[in-house]
Image (spheres, rainbow, N blue to C red):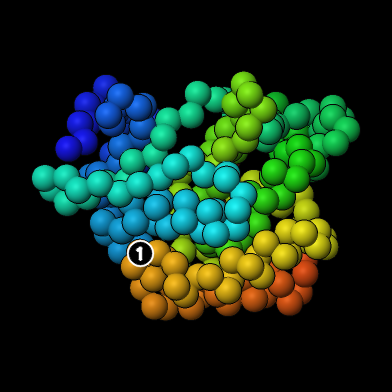
Amino acid sequence: MSQLRIIERLPQASNGAFLAELDGVKVVFKPNHLEKELWDFPTGTLALRERATYVMDQLLGWNLVPTTELVETEQGFASVQHWVEAKPSLVEIFPSEDVPEQWLGVLDGEGPSGQPLTLAHQDLEVLMKIALLDAVVNNADRKGGHILSADDGSTYAIDHGVTFHDEPKLRTVLWGWAGQEIPTHLLADLVQASEEIRESELKDLLTEHELLATVERISELTETKVFSVPNDEWPSLPWPLF
């Protein structure tokens, strides 16, 4: 039987999340009974959505999301995601005149004293994949701090509790490719995944409406062949950004 040991609560998490060890492996433990009520997502389903995003990532073959499983608890169930020793570094805010080459500007604004600032992210294929994954799972909260760069060069996407709503809710800091053509090989991955969705574990994690909406989002991407663009009817950026 698996042994779970709580190490500490993660204070920056908006819902109940803990650093823990499961059979000696460090994990992020998110029990569903500690999820805060949200006006637009059913209570107690965020852990399911964490697992569903991992499953979607596996269908795409991109390995962006750390291994995420569901475990039973005395109060219900929880998502358990492998802990990643990494730091956010691929999304930054710069003085507007100092945005590095190979970085894509997303938003211009002003600092406290009126200095021009620009939110930007690196122009990397792995971030393209995360942007597409977010569009597929309808991620309502892709903050800059939810993209981690590991010492071995790997990049990971974490925190996927508010995903897979059947209404458009995409909020992300990765708008650098908005409206641009999706590379052909990534389109092929989307097509392959769409053919496997209905028979995958997703049918047990999502409602029928949510599953259908996911298929439709992939179809829109593969038919238009361009990255998603901001929706004027919904805030396009998460807040806070990091």
State whether residue 89 appears in this view.
no
Kind of element beneath mark 1: helix
The spot of residue 56 in percent (x, y) is: 51, 58
The spot of residue 60 in percent (x, y) is: 60, 58
In screen coordinates, is 21 left or right of 50? left
Residue sticking out furthest to the front: 1
Residue matched to label 1: 205
Is the residue marked by circle 1 packed among few (<14), some (14-19), or many (20+) residues within 10 Å?
some
* The image quarter in which residue 210 lies: bottom left
Work out whether 215 lies above or below 184.
below
The residue that appears at 44% across and 67% down in the rendered structure is 200
The spot of residue 90 in percent (x, y) is: 68, 33
For the N terminus, the image quarter is top left
Work out whether 233 lies above or below 86.
below
Q: How many marks?
A: 1
The residue that appears at 64% across and 76% down in the rendered structure is 219
* Of 193 and 86, the residue lying toward us: 193
The residue that appears at 59% across and 26% down in the rendered structure is 150
The spot of residue 72 in percent (x, y) is: 20, 48
Q: Amino acid at mark 1?
A: Leu
State whether residue 7 appears in this view.
yes
In screen coordinates, is 156 left or right of 190? left
In screen coordinates, is 157 left or right of 231? left
Work out whether 116 lies above or below 227.
above
